[in-house]
Image: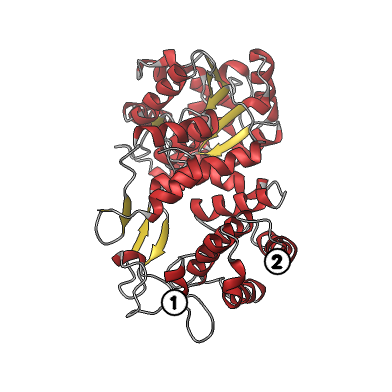
Amino acid sequence: MDEMIKYINSDGIVQAWHHLTSTYFDRNRPRIDPVVCVNVLTLFYRYGRGTQLSQTFQWVYQILYYRAYLDGTRYYCYPESFLYFLNRLIASSDSPELHRYLKPLLLERVLERIGASGDAMALAMRILVCKSMGIRNEVDARSLLALQCEDGGWELCWMFQHPSTKTKVGNRGLNTALAINAINAVKE
Amino acid sequence: MFAKFTTIIFDLGDVLFNWSPQTKTTISPMTFKRILSSPTWFEYECGKISQDSCYERIGNQFAIDPSEVANAIAQAQDSLQSNNELVSAIQQLKAESNGGLRIYAMSNVSRPDYQVLHTKFTGWSIFDQVFTSGAVGERKPGLAFYRHVINATGINPQNTIFVDDTSENVLSARSVGFHGIIFDDTRQVIRALRNLVGDPVKRGKEFLEMNSKNLKSTSDSDDAMDDNFMQLLILDATNNR
């Protein structure tokens, strides 16, 4: 974590590692991606060090506020990834800025996505965020149920994209695991 | 939204059986289809008129020799082929349900034509019962036919899936409480049936277990790739491995 803090840019925003080349923090390729910021924040909040990244937090909030994520981010293909990882961030700590400041806005933003088009992963993420907000999202669950494949899994959905080559990466196991959780979330 | 489906009703023509209106007679496929959707034909389907008088009246209405009508029908019957992919999927669903799934057929077909159809297929045992317009005296999309089937079987429409290639038949089915599926593509319909009849969570977990330790990530340029972030996310979602 101390190493990560060295990767804060002049705007105070923690910069990304490059997933697809597995060079995690590569100072030669400074990139910023909101989802990566959220995941770094999650780690910091979990260990009570969230305030060390207050400018990154503020930027993430602005992105949510202005819906800057609607066309996906640099590495993540669709808006729900951002919302899903934000939801994980909120669960990482009971810090008031997460629960009193960020959570009400996330609730608003996920509500306005209900019923929007999306693949199985996007739908599952949306349903799971709704569940955390106390909302039972039946609309998207109906669509998700129809997308189950004959082999019991859900079809491949792209999660990451390699920004320069535009190669997309996904994992059916992950889609399926999230879909199961989403359906259970609506069943309860 | 998690209704438990215990019954599926299938249409026969163009769902479980395919056939061709292309005959070696003077009747074009288009005229053939018009004959089959004429009021006279509907009366014949419901057993209100005999085969002979049906062919005769059709002959008059379409200015065709009645024997030519009979020929065309016979040739169309010869072209009948069962949709084996769908048949075996039904058998599988039935087997997996451990007796929890009843299968019915509900078809607009005259008595004489059903007798011929009966000889074209050996798998009739997949059906718990077959309802034909010829025997019931009512045809889809008339509600009386649906009500007859509901009363005769004692099924609860809300636990019943109805599959038919004609949207008006599906609409009527939905209006009496069935879950309607418009038949377009066999694989799509089989998938939809599995998703309605099966337990989604149980099936999903089976998929994960069957493929555990082999849930590689995929990219659109090369097939499989190793990454650890998605594996961690799977772990996060399943609390397993």
Tell me residue A60's x, y (percent): 59, 72
Query: Label 1: how many residues lie within 10 Å, few (<14), some (14-19) or many (20+)?
Result: few
Tell me residue B78's x, y (percent): 32, 26
Tell me residue A127's x, y (percent): 61, 50
Q: Which mark is residue B3?
A: none
| Residue under pointer 1 | A6
- Are marks 1 and 2 in one subunit? yes
Q: Identify the residue at horizontal 41%, vertical 58% (top origin).
A: A158
Q: Identify the residue at horizontal 36%, vertical 65% (top origin).
A: A19
What distance separates the C-alpha of mark 1 from that of mark 2?
Answer: 24 Å
Chain containing mark 1: A
Q: Identify the residue at horizontal 56%, vertical 70% (top origin).
A: A70
Label 1 vs 2, first from the N-terminus:
1
Query: Label 2: how many residues lie within 10 Å, few (<14), some (14-19) or many (20+)?
Result: some
Q: Is residue B113 above or below residue B40?
A: above
Looking at the rendering, which quadrant does residue A91 occupy? bottom right
Q: Helix or strand or loop: what does disc 2 sit on?
A: helix
The N terminus of chain B - image quarter? top right
Q: A97 or B95, which is in the foreground?
A: A97
Looking at the rendering, which quadrant does residue A142 occupy? top right
Residue A171 in sight from this viewpoint = yes
Q: Is residue B170 above or below residue A143?
A: above
Q: A28 or B67, which is in the foreground?
A: A28
Q: Is residue B204 above or below residue A1?
A: above
Q: Helix or strand or loop: what does disc 1 sit on?
A: loop
Chain containing mark 2: A
Q: Is residue A25 above or below residue A178?
A: below
Q: B168 or A76, which is in the foreground?
A: A76
Q: Is residue B213 left or right of residue B175?
A: left
| Residue under pointer 2 | A97
Tell me residue A125's x, y (percent): 56, 53
